[in-house]
Image (tube, rainbow, N blue to C red):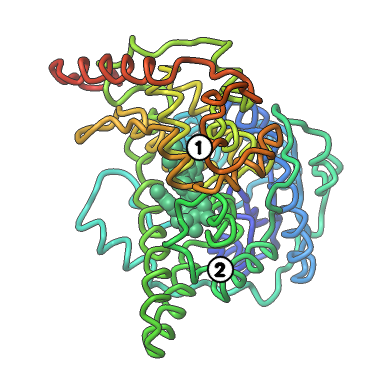
Amino acid sequence: MVQVVWFKKDFRTLDHAPLHAASLAGDVLPLYVVEPSIWNFGDLSVRHYQFVKESLTDLNVRLKKLGASLYVMVSDMVEALDRLYEILGPFVMHSHMEHGLTHTYERDRAVKAWMDAHECVWREYQGDAVLRGKYVGHRPTYMKTYLKSPVIPVPKSIQGVKRSDKTLGNVDLLDTFTPPGSPADAPVRGGESEAIKHANAFFQSRFKAYQISISKPAKSIHSSSYLSAYLTWGNISIKSLHKATENHLKTLKETQQTFYKKQLSAFHTRLFWRSHFVEKVEMKPWIDHISKDPRYDDVRHRDSDAFKKFTTGHTGFPFVDACIRFLNRTSWLNFRQRAMLTSFACNTLLLDWKDVGRFLATQWIDYEPGIHWSQIQMQAGLIPPRHIPIYDVIKQSKETDPDGAFIRMNVPELAHLNADDIHEPWTLDSNPYIAPMVDYATVLKASKETLYQIKKEPKRKPYV
Ligand SMILES: Cc1cc2nc3c(=O)[nH]c(=O)nc-3n(C[C@H](O)[C@H](O)[C@H](O)COP(=O)(O)OP(=O)(O)OC[C@H]3O[C@@H](n4cnc5c(N)ncnc54)[C@H](O)[C@@H]3O)c2cc1C
């Protein structure tokens, strides 16, 4: 039987268990299916698609060197399986487990039902340090055990399937589909080769200022790893990255470079956080549309004018606008900036957290449902218990961008202002910028009072 390898969000050849197993089992048909219902769901955009296209082009080059080519289909998955069956008869399909929202679980359930009904075998492999289903045992131990397991080598060679059919296209077919959204001017490029380049650059020097610059908008551009998109789309495996980090940490320890070791340890910790958050959608695949705290369900609203000002970076608050414009141009922001934007939109403007979350998901290239929706709900104060994170955007601006370099870089209208004036241009005799969309102090105070008043009400469980 032909061994189909279904690439989902794992566009690489190293540490790819499904590809490795298939290469040992027989003739291999590497496959990517562009599923319109997944791409048009509302949380993905042309930005992600461009990244995926680059990843698949790179993957195809790598597969060809090993003896196989990548096939592409544009259709929903069950329909794709029907066509495969017509061409191949019964087949074995290998893929990584996907950790996603309700609609991708439903797609996977439909695939399983189809495979069972057609007496085809679907082998799913673990691709992250994530426990499927209910917790069994001690999760941190489980996570570490997985991460310590060996990295699976690139197959020595792959016997590509001989037969083909015109319903199975090659990577050129990717150009026939266009998802919604607008492309970024300066995005990170996708692909395993790019992931390796970024990882090398990080371990060589970027990491040296990792932690001290993590929340600084202009500096973090040069010290963050920028590896999140490569992890999201599986250009690099979490296991390989953990191992590479551990090796570098060992060298730093041996050479007693304590300061640098601290920087890299902070990065290492975040890799654990990643798996912890990815796991959230295993238990709560509904977190993109059901609030964890329904007490706040009625307080946030849809305001298309405010939403437009926020999403285009025309709020009149220089730092907020700089963050949004940078995001729209590059598809990336550091953690603090993401948290502040979410809080500003959900806790100051009181915009609907689902709309805000969906917009941000389509913009950042590393959109990973488990991390993303947990953070959106957390920053909107819906995941208890401690506090509702309300960031003062003026304070953030002065603290994290004291000389205004990041604002100047992204809001050219303010490039001529000095550090004293750039954070609050409305305090000048003549404001050279758009007027703030709201009276900040008044709205911030009112929203805070509203949210904290609700927090005093008796707790309620999510309506799942
Ligand atoms: C509202 C909001 C939404 C977010 N959505 C996403 C998302 O969709 N995808 C995503 O990868 N990250 C998300 N993050 C977390 C974080 O902001 C990004 O991982 C980080 O900015 C990516 O840049 P980097 O790769 O240079 O990260 P680094 O700082 O170099 O971190 C290394 C890796 O650790 C992981 N990581 C870092 N911070 C976190 C965190 N707080 N929680 C879980 N994992 C983390 C990421 O995989 C990241 O690539 C979100 C944060 C907020 C506040």
Disc nearer the start of the sequence (2/1) = 1
Residue at image location 64% in from the left, 31% down from the top: 39
Horizontal side of residue 96 vs 45, given as left or right: left
Classify residue 404 by image quadrant.
Answer: top right
Give the label on residue 100, or none.
none
Q: How many marks?
A: 2
Are circles 2 and 1 on residues that touch, CB within 8 Å?
no
Residue at image location 57% in from the left, 76% down from the top: 204
- The answer to whether residue 95 of the structure is visible from this angle is yes
The residue singled out by tag 2 in the image is 206
Q: Nearer the viewer, residue 451 or 8?
A: 451
Q: Nearer the viewer, residue 357 or 67?
A: 357
The residue singled out by tag 1 in the image is 108
Give residue 45's position: percent from left, percent from top. Answer: 66, 33
Disc 2 residue lies near ligand 1 with CB under 8 A: no
Residue at image location 74% in from the left, 64% down from the top: 63
Q: Secondary structure at mark 2?
A: helix
Q: Nearer the viewer, residue 350 or 31?
A: 350
Horizontal side of residue 366 vs 130, given as left or right: right
